[in-house]
Amino acid sequence: MLSGLACMTLRLLVLGATGKTGTHILDLALARGHQVTAFVRSPQKIVRRHPALSIVQGDPMQVNALAQALPGHHAVLSALGPSGREAFQPNSLLAECAASTVAAMERASVTRLAMVSAALLFPGGGLRFALFRRLIRHHLRDLVAAEAVIRATPFDWTLARPPRLVEAPEETYRSEREALPTGAWSMSFRAVGAFLLDCIEQGAHTREVVGLARR
């Protein structure tokens, strides 16, 4: 387990680095002095250049490519997600990526993983949550399967379940183990990235599902 490493330079591999949450993870991790590898299908989408940033082209569903990129890293942070259209259609993107990530981590002896999931997997939330669950039911089934893959491992994993994500500058958040904090409706992509990094640096919330909310 990684613990008390906030002052240590970490080597972090980021999946989904070209997405909205992933972009903020890159920015925050580099600002905190970490070495970051962005493992992406389309390297040209990353315009950021930094001496501590490495960009590796690869498909997160390909175990061999991931396993080759992983040695020497302290942790994997996954902000993978479907496109807008894919979220409304049956697919197994996240479950397949979870399986390939787990297999690659086993080969590379990397045991720390933090992944973005969704608050809609918590029960309750009223009519508004029920409506969204119905609209993106295919995506939620995929997330449930992906979480199951990760929960079955012996790794030190963290599953972050934020509510609706918006573009905003704040990095602060509230968190609650196994539940959505009260009054949670939306929060920033950047705050989710900050939470994932805090978990890795502090060795916090290992083998826990954590609900997030705007502070």
Image (tube, helix red, strand yellow):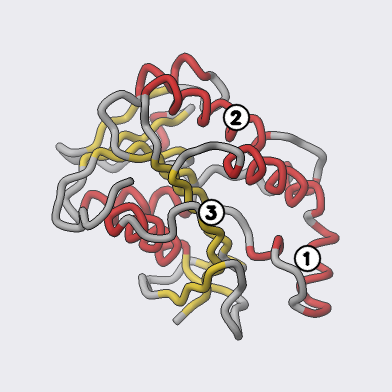
Dot 2: within a 10 Å radius of its alpha carbon, few (fewer than 14), some, or many (20 or more) residues? many
Disc 3 residue type (three-letter) = Leu
> In terms of secondary structure, where does tag 1 sit?
helix
Task: Answer above or below: position of 168 versus 135.
Answer: below
Mark with earlier residue (1, 2): 2
Looking at the image, is mark 3 or mark 2 earlier in the sequence? 2
Give percent across and percent down for residue 154: 50, 38
Classed neighbour count for the residue bearing mark 1: other residues with Cα under 10 Å, few (<14), some (14–19), many (≥20): few
Question: Which residue lies under the disc numbered 1?
Answer: 132
**Who's the residue at 56% across and 65% down the image?**
162
Secondary element at tag 2: helix
Of tags 3 and 1, which is closer to the observer? Answer: 3
Left or right of 132: which side holds 75? Answer: left
**Residue 164, percent from left and from top:** 61, 67
Nearest to the observer: residue 178 or residue 21: 178
In this view of the protein, which residue sits in the foreground, 75 or 131? 75
- Quarter of the image that includes the C terminus: bottom left
Q: What is the three-letter code of the residue carrying label 2? A: Ala
Mark linked to residue 215? none
In this rendering, the answer to whether 51 lies above or below 144 is above
Q: Which residue is mark 3?
A: 159
Instruction: Give the image location of residue 187, x and y in percent.
Output: 51, 72
Q: Where is mark 2, residue-wise?
A: 99
Q: Earlier in the sequence, mark 3 or mark 1?
A: 1
- Of tags 1 and 2, the one toward the viewer is 2
